[in-house]
Image: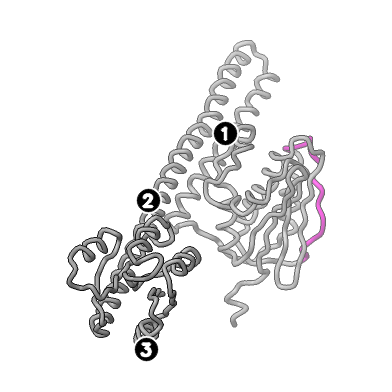
């Protein structure tokens, strides 16, 4: 928008008419004081400012607005009948003006100058946008680098922990065998096996991340019965976690189309997390049911829960809740992998949670192949 400031109404009318005819948006002020009030409220690309006005003259107005943050990129063209006065021209430039036009105004010259300033303004704005985008991209690279470094550190720790534990149990196992204490040796051997399984899961997650990044995560899609899968899985999870009662709710009652192993992987992740993040709870609920053309699965715990701001990011890669990261270790990739698996099944994954009251992780997937639906 252009602001014309002149105490002569006839000058304002003629300038406004020419500029609006050339598709410029125009505002007007008949005094320096009125101009300042408008500049405080609006942003202008260009101000056409008469020098000789009663009260505040054009130079005083220019000096006053030079300190306004809203007007710091606004160009000023001075208008004056005293074109031959070098002192006035010099004062105009020192007051913040970028150009000077003498009266009577040659409208063609004025239009050329206005168009030039607008072009410069547009180029400057585009450059500022590019700089802003570049700064954001640099910050995003820095954040990605920070997350990568943090992930490497966490992964190294998570991998080192079971290895250290395995090494310790092997030493204890050797002592038990030296004493011919077979019962103790079996217990310690089982603990070694548990740590090996934990290590295998960590490595599997790391490999899945690599495959997702390279687009090579493979799926063996076919129809399978989900209820027997869930029965077997819950039986195994219950045996491995006798401290919590796993309550099953509902049945699917039909075959679904998907990768059986990958769906099981998601369910295991949900149940493992539910147990992990509700150490003081006595039960968790696993629900499965058919909803129209979809099947619905959820795992509900009664643990620590999470705040709403974390729910938006919990499925992001490497995302870990800072408040619980020290107490509950993890790589921050399990739920990201789950999200990739469910989306590859054309499904939807989500969470409902209340801080201090527990969480319910869920997903929907279609029962049939999308290709079959199209046929």
Quarter of the rendering occupied by the C terminus: bottom right
Q: Return the x and y of residue 303 as percentages of the image width and height.
A: 75, 41
User: Would you say the residues marked 2 and 1 are in contact, meaning their CB atoms lie under 8 Å apart?
Assistant: no
From this view, report whether residue 112 is shown above or below residue 245: below
Of residues 302 and 272, the one drawn nearer to the viewer in this rendering: 302
- The residue lying at 78 percent from left, 46 percent from top is 284
Of residues 139 and 302, the one drawn nearer to the viewer in this rendering: 139
Q: Is residue 96 left or right of residue 357?
A: left
Residue at mark 3: 21
Q: CA distance from mark 2 to mark 1?
A: 40 Å
Q: Dividing the picture into quarters, in which one does residue 294 lie?
A: bottom right
Q: Dividing the picture into quarters, in which one does residue 11 lie?
A: bottom left
Residue at mark 1: 196
| Number of residue marks | 3
Please say whether residue 216 is visible from this viewpoint.
yes
Q: Is residue 59 left or right of residue 147?
A: left
- The residue lying at 40 percent from left, 46 percent from top is 142
Q: CA distance from mark 1 to mark 3?
A: 80 Å
């Amino acid at each position: 928008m252009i602001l014309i400031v002149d105490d002569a109404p006839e000058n304002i009318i003629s300038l406004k008419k020419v500029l609006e005819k050339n598709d410029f948006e125009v505002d007007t002020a008949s005094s320096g004081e009125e101009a300042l009030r408008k500049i405080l409220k609006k942003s202008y690309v260009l101000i056409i400012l008469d020098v000789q006005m009663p009260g505040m003259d054009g130079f005083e107005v220019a000096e006053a607005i030079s300190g306004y943050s809203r007007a710091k990129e606004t160009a000023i063209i001075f208008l004056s009948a005293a074109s031959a006065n070098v002192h006035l021209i010099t004062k105009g430039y020192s007051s913040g003006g970028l150009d000077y036009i003498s009266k009577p105004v040659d409208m063609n010259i004025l239009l050329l100058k206005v168009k030039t300033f607008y072009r410069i303004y547009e180029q400057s704005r585009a450059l500022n946008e590019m700089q802003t985008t570049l700064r954001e991209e640099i910050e995003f690279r820095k954040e990605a680098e920070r997350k990568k470094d943090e992930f490497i550190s966490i992964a190294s720790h998570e991998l080192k922990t079971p290895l250290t534990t395995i090494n310790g149990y092997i030493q204890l196992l050797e002592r038990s065998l030296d004493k011919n204490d077979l019962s103790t040796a079996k217990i310690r051997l089982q603990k070694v096996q548990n740590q090996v399984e934990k290590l295998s899961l960590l490595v599997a997650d790391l490999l899945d991340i690599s495959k997702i990044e390279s687009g090579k995560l493979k799926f063996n899609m076919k129809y399978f019965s989900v209820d027997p899968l869930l029965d077997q899985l819950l039986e195994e999870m219950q045996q491995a976690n006798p401290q919590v009662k796993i309550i099953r709710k509902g049945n699917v009652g039909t075959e679904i189309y998907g990768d059986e192993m990958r769906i099981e992987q998601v369910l295991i992740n949900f149940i493992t997390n539910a147990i992990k993040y509700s150490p003081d709870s006595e039960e968790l609920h696993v629900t499965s049911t058919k909803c129209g053309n979809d099947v619905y699965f959820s795992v509900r715990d009664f643990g620590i829960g999470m705040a709403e701001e974390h729910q938006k990011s919990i499925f992001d890669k490497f995302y870990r809740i800072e408040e619980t990261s020290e107490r509950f270790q993890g790589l921050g990739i399990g739920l990201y992998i789950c999200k990739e698996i469910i989306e590859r099944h054309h499904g939807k994954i989500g969470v409902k949670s209340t801080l201090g009251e527990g969480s319910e992780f869920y997903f929907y997937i279609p029962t049939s192949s999308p290709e079959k639906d199209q046929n």
